[in-house]
């Protein structure tokens, strides 16, 4: 049995990849990393490090042109600033709509593309790292359980019952994801979450705030901010 994992190079997808490798073995796992026109390539660089660490096959896909009509603040062609505040603060102004860093139907497109490639590569399951914190308040509706169920059914039916969709963290908080990842020894020092593409994470955008909180709730300093001192290599030696 082979698995495909959507691998962005962030905390959640890297934890998903670790789960898949533990379950199926690295020879039976494929990481799919997608460029969509984001303002930096730090995510792609991180995904390369993660895939190399787990010794899995990695595929790349460029979907930049599909999002050329969007003014999402994450995209390179947008003049909008990335908000430097929590998602909760942003949602106070959206009237139930997604936040400005929501790329329109991104996960739907990613999963559809992944399904086609997964079938061609002989995979029978796709993993993606959606979790409940991102879905809360409709910030990222394509991370919700309802979306996962709908896409899962579409992929299963559309593949002739050959392919299933797994989102193991869809009802978890990010802190719970990190807790599992720490147990699995995920090399979080290699991951990148910040929406900015600077040398260091900004610490102020929504995803930086969520990431910091997830590690704090686990009583561990984020290894990405410590040069790996609290990272997976140390944890695996305990």
Image (spheres, rainbow, N blue to C red):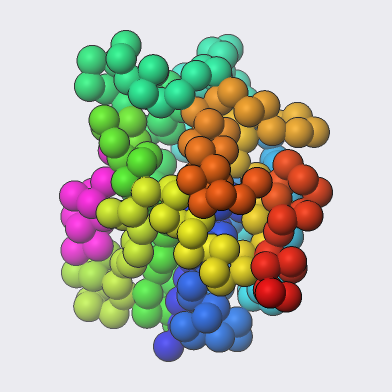
Residue at image position (47%, 83%) is: 23
Return the x and y of residue 168 as percentages of the image width and height.
Answer: 35, 64
Q: What residue is at 37 percent from the left and 48 percent from the top? A: 173
Q: Image quadrant for the C terminus?
A: bottom right
Q: Quadrant of residue 124?
A: bottom left
- Residue 73 falls inside the magenta stretch: no
Res. 188 image quadrant: bottom right
Viewer-proximal residue among 78 and 81? 81
The secondary structure that most of the magenta stretch takes on is helix
Residue 48 percent across, percent down from the top left: 71, 59
Quarter of the image for the N terminus: give it. Answer: bottom left
Return the residue nearer the eye: 152 or 89: 89
In the picture provided, is 128 more to the left or to the right than 151?
Answer: right
Q: Position of residue 127 (x, y in %)?
A: 41, 65
**Is 61 placed above or below 41 here?**
below
Q: Is residue 131 left or right of residue 221?
A: left
Residue 197 lies, with reference to residue 81, above or below; the image says below
Q: Which residues are magenta?
A: 141-153
Instruction: Name the residue rendered at 50%, 28% in the picture.
Output: 206
Residue 128 visible in the picture: yes
Q: Does the magenta segment cover residue 152?
A: yes
Q: Is residue 62 visible?
A: no
Give the side of residue 159 with respect to residue 39, left or right. Answer: left
Looking at the image, is 41 positioned above or below residue 5? above
**What residue is shown at x 19% (from left), y 55% (from top)?**
150
């Amino acid at each position: 049995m082979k698995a495909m994992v959507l691998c962005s190079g962030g905390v959640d997808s890297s934890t998903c990849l670790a789960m898949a490798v533990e379950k199926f073995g690295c020879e039976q796992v494929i990481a799919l990393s997608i460029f969509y026109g984001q303002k930096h390539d730090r995510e792609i660089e991180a995904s390369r490090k993660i895939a190399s660490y787990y010794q899995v096959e990695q595929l790349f896909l460029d979907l930049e042109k599909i999002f050329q009509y969007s003014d999402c603040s994450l995209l390179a062609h947008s003049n909008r600033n990335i908000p430097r505040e929590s998602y909760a603060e942003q949602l106070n102004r959206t009237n139930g709509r997604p936040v400005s860093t929501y790329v329109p139907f991104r996960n739907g497109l990613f999963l559809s593309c992944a399904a086609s490639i997964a079938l061609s590569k002989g995979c029978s399951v796709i993993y993606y790292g959606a979790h409940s914190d991102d879905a809360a308040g409709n910030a990222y509706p394509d991370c919700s359980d309802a979306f996962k169920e709908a896409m899962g059914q579409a992929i299963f039916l559309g593949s002739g019952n050959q392919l299933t969709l797994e989102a193991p963290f869809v009802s978890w908080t990010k802190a719970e994801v990190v807790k599992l990842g720490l147990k699995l020894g995920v090399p979080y020092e290699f991951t990148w979450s910040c929406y900015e593409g600077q040398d260091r994470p900004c610490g102020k955008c929504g995803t930086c705030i969520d990431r910091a909180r997830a590690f704090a709730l686990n009583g561990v300093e984020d290894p990405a901010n410590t040069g790996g001192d609290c990272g997976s290599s140390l944890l695996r030696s305990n």
